[in-house]
């Protein structure tokens, strides 16, 4: 039966397991095994598809003792096979060559999912002559096997024109191994390309988001400054009833300014240490500057600030952006503390670190949300029903700045309605 196969054509059943080809020549077996090991090493060392396929094809030509080897991949859009690589031919020249599934040898191999030997191709009606015209390779004999990733067919690999004799079952087993290696290489490259494409899309979306935030915050500053100026003027000079309305306008404008500042400083999460220039600084001065900045907002509510800071200057090596951490934490405490309430600012020191605590008597934080509140745009309340404002950026920015200074920030809360404590630990000089 085998003699008949090599005279005309013969198909073999494919299984998921691949055994090494059997040869009576020990030296040939060693050379074959060494070449396959080389292919495996190259396969695991690069994801550049064209050089990899070129190497695999050259190795296949040597192992099968044939004139050329080609790889055709299935294109789902056109439902045809297209050449991905042929020995000695540029990939770009092959990309335009399509091979139909019906009426071609490669199509038969792909559809029937089994290897095929034809040792007299010119007299076979299934031979697709257009390929010979494009590649200028006269095909006399051919061996083809399907390429698969697990159970999914992705293409066909063909060996053309056996030099020494005719293609045999041993050649089928060898080409099947090469087909498996090629399929792994192609699949790895496709997955990497998809991952790179997805990453590029994410980076583009992230860049667009950052640009939008920068432009929006810049454009909001001018009208916001005008509103705050007129509201302050009216509050100081108007009658009592109008002054109260002006005070409400000013409070709303101050909250809007805090949102704009969050948008402006959002880039701190992404830019990293290139924006940080630490200098020896008295930490008490930074905290008092933060309190001064939010005092206008605090003045619109009836909350009382209790500040307990050491008299001895505590020097830390920090950037002035650290003030933003305490501005955001105090804003957070004011926003979530009902009137009248108290907000405590305390500082504790040790030889190696300094700890700043900001405690409020506000709505508290559920235990399962103590870490999530530091995520960008995260809000404990549902966005459709929440009563408190904010973009959900303040704590994310605060954590980014603290981490850049080699410190740590975390939250503690006995539970909802029982207040919250935010702690910032920074290394001492």
Image (cartoon, rainbow, N blue to C red):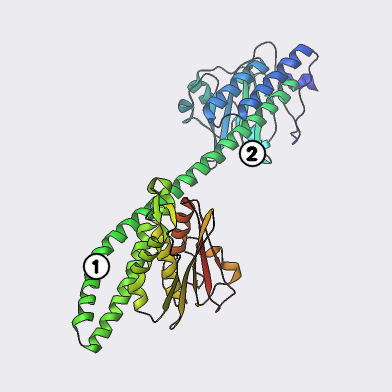
Q: Residue at x 58, y 25 (%)?
A: 70
Residue 331 % position (x, y): 41, 70
Seen from the viewer's position, the closer of residues 314 and 246 is 314
Residue 160 % position (x, y): 61, 19
Q: Could you say whether the residue bearing mark 1 is in a helix, strand or loop?
A: helix
**In the drawing, does residue 373 fall left or right of residue 237?**
right
Residue 352 is labelled as none
- Label 2 and label 1: CA atoms lie apart by 65 Å
Closer to us: mark 2 or mark 1? 1
Residue denoted by label 2: 153
Look at the picture and state if 174 lies above or below 393: above
Q: Residue furthest front?
A: 312
Q: Tag 1: Cα neighbours inside 10 Å, few (<14), some, or many (≥20)?
A: some
Q: Residue at x 27, y 63 (%)?
A: 221
Residue 33 % position (x, y): 72, 20
Can you tell which quarter of the image residue 38 is in?
A: top right
Residue 195 % position (x, y): 53, 43
Can residue 267 be seen by looking at this rendering?
A: no
Residue denoted by label 1: 225
**In the drawing, does residue 212 fall left or right of residue 187?**
left
Can residue 247 be seen by looking at this rendering?
A: yes
Seen from the viewer's position, the closer of residues 359 and 427 is 427
Q: Tag 2: Cα neighbours inside 10 Å, few (<14), some, or many (≥20)?
A: some
**Quadrant placement of the N terminus:** top right
Q: Earlier in the sequence, mark 2 or mark 1?
A: 2
Q: Could you say whether the residue bearing mark 2 is in a helix, strand or loop?
A: strand
**In the drawing, does residue 326 fall left or right of residue 60?**
left
Look at the picture and state if 347 lies above or below 74: below
């Amino acid at each position: 039966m085998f003699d008949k196969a090599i005279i005309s054509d013969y198909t073999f059943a494919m299984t998921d397991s691949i055994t090494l080809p059997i040869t009576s020549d020990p030296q040939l077996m060693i050379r074959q095994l060494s070449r396959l090991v080389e292919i495996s090493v190259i396969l695991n060392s690069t994801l550049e598809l064209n050089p990899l396929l070129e190497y695999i094809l050259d190795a296949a030509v040597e192992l099968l003792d044939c004139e050329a080897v080609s790889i055709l991949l299935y294109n789902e859009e056109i439902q045809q096979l297209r050449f991905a690589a042929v020995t000695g031919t540029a990939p770009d020249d092959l990309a335009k060559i399509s091979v139909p599934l019906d009426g071609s040898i490669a199509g038969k191999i792909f559809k029937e999912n089994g290897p095929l030997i034809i040792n007299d191709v010119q007299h076979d009606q299934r031979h697709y002559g257009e390929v010979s015209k494009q590649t200028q390779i006269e095909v006399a004999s051919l061996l083809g096997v399907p390429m698969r990733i697990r159970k999914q067919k992705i293409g066909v690999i063909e060996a053309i024109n056996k030099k020494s004799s005719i293609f045999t079952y041993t050649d089928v087993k060898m080409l099947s191994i090469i087909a498996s290696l090629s399929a792994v290489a192609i699949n790895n490259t496709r997955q990497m390309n998809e991952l790179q494409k997805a990453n590029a899309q994410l980076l583009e979306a992230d860049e667009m988001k950052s640009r939008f935030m920068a432009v929006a915050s810049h454009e909001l500053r001018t009208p916001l400054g005008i509103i705050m100026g007129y509201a302050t003027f009216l509050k100081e000079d108007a009658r009592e009833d109008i002054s109260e309305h002006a005070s409400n306008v000013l409070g709303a404008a101050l909250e809007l300014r805090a949102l704009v500042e969050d948008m402006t400083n959002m880039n701190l999460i992404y830019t990293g240490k290139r924006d940080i220039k630490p200098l020896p600084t008295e930490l008490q001065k930074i905290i008092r500057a933060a309190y001064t900045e939010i005092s206008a907002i605090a003045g619109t509510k009836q909350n009382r600030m209790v500040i307990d800071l050491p008299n001895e200057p505590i020097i830390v090596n920090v950037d002035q952006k650290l003030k933003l951490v305490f501005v955001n934490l105090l804003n957070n405490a004011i926003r979530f503390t009902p009137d009248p309430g108290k907000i405590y600012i305390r500082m504790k020191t040790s030889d190696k670190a300094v700890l700043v605590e900001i405690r409020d008597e506000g709505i508290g934080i559920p235990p399962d949300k103590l870490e999530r509140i530091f995520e960008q745009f995260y809000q404990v309340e549902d966005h459709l029903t929440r009563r408190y404002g904010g973009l959900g950026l303040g704590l994310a920015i605060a954590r980014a700045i603290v981490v850049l200074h080699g410190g740590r920030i975390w939250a503690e809360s006995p539970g909802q309605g029982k207040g919250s404590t935010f702690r910032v630990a920074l290394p001492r000089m």
